[in-house]
Image (tube, grey):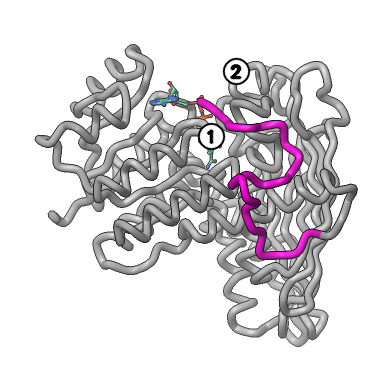
Amino acid sequence: MSDKVKAVVIGAGGGIGKAHCEVINRSDKSQLVAIVDRKEQNRTELSKKYECKAYESIEDLLSDSALELDCVVIATPHPQHADAAVLAFDAGKHVLVEKVFTSTLEDADRILKAQQRSGKKCGTICQRRFLVPSLRVKHAIDEGLIGTPMLGKVLMYGWRADGYYQEKPWRGTWKNEGGGLLLNQAPHQLDLLLWFMGPVEKVWGDWDNVAHKDSIEVEDTVNAIVKFKNGATANIFLTNAMNPGIYCNVHVTGSNCNSVGVETDRGAMFVAGASAAAGVVSKPAQPPTTDIWEIAGEPDHLSEWNEEERAFHYGLEDPLLYYHGQLFDDFFSAILEDREPLVTGEDGRNVVELITAIYMSRNKGNQWIDFPLKPDANGMYDDGRPIEKVVG
Ligand SMILES: NC(=O)c1ccc[n+]([C@@H]2O[C@H](COP(=O)([O-])OP(=O)(O)OC[C@H]3O[C@@H](n4cnc5c(N)ncnc54)[C@H](O)[C@@H]3O)[C@@H](O)[C@H]2O)c1
């Protein structure tokens, strides 16, 4: 392999796929050698812009033996992630999958089995791990500054108008998306919670569609409790039904009662394909910040850090490209250095397992769901989602 990872984006013409092309093109660790999109207009535009090859399907791409290719980046709607990832691993490529890793746990397991067969790298995209305040919180936990993490909290006071769901026909449907805000908006914060707190013992969950009944079939609001293997507990409250949004944070308190936390979102920073002007989100973007930092004996850093975080954020040309760039840089370095990426396929699967357990809990009359989840005899998960087989 050369000193640059030769990469392709599947679903390159979509809201996030275009950002992937730009990130890969700008990086000194990668080269965009091809794009795949089922829409001809997207293929024409992007292959011209990036002077690369274009294919209509992943099958066409992989059957081109003349194309030198190391890595497949998947940016199609989530129910289609698994089929593309399995084909790519079986063709001997490294694979990076957009969040949410998959719509079902069954699909996540298919990907990880294919990865094991291939021995290649698998990563998933959770760019909020690369926020300065997220890294600060993780560092504090790893350094033992809060003792053992014991209390966790994920709060997402979010807002999406009907227009957000109507923008893309696959959104908000059981069949074509596989779920609602658990799958689409929350994976970032759920990933942070698991990264900070560790492995899960059991989950209680409830979910509903409280304010989008005319526009979507899936949930817009979720309540859940997580018990971790080390005895810790966390509370999760998520909604897309609170106008004004957006305010999301993940807080952790430790066994010594010290607390750390990150506000990942405020305003519309990462709402791909949506804009405040269109009335889809309620407020413009504001910087991610360290929003709680109580370490006994430490001086108060918060105001100084928040000032730095704001200056840093407002100095960025494009936050979405910057944070995706950080994650892609780590993934491509993992390939070049033959090490694990910061966000692995296994991490992606853990988020899908947590989401599946929340769906299952309500389906079983709000029972506690013990981990690890196991597929039933038919290979489907009894989580109550009316998706016999999600299709693209
Ligand atoms: N990390 C983030 O912040 C972030 C932000 C937005 C979206 N996403 C994720 O990215 C994925 C895509 O979301 P989006 O909003 O960009 O979707 P989108 O509908 O805008 O784009 C999907 C693109 O894939 C193409 N496509 C669909 N099926 C295909 C197939 N089988 N073969 C080839 N091309 C195909 C479509 O033509 C389209 O161009 C989702 O899983 C979503 O959750 C992540």
Mark 2 crowd level (few <14, some 14–19, many ≥20, 10 Å Cα):
few
Q: Quadrant of the N terminus?
A: bottom left
Q: Nearest to the eye among marks 2 and 1: give it.
A: 1
Tell me if 239 is positioned left or right of 347 in this view.
right
Question: In terms of image quadrants, where is residue 182?
Answer: top right
**Residue shown at 59%/26% (left/top)?**
176
Q: CA distance from mark 2 to mark 1?
A: 13 Å
Tell me if 336 is positioned left or right of 152 in this view.
left
Question: What residue would you read off at disc 1?
Answer: 79
Magenta stretch in the rendered image: 369-392
Label whose residue precedes the other's in the sequence (2 or 1): 1
**Residue shown at 46%/41% (left/top)?**
82
Amino acid carrying label 1: it is Pro
Amino acid carrying label 2: it is Pro
Mark 1 crowd level (few <14, some 14–19, many ≥20, 10 Å Cα):
many
Measured as percent of width and height from the top left, residue 159 is found at 76, 32
Question: What residue would you read off at disc 2?
Answer: 169
The relative height of residue 207 versus residue 175 in the rendered view (above or below) is: below
For the residue pair 194 and 265, the one nearer the viewer reads as 194
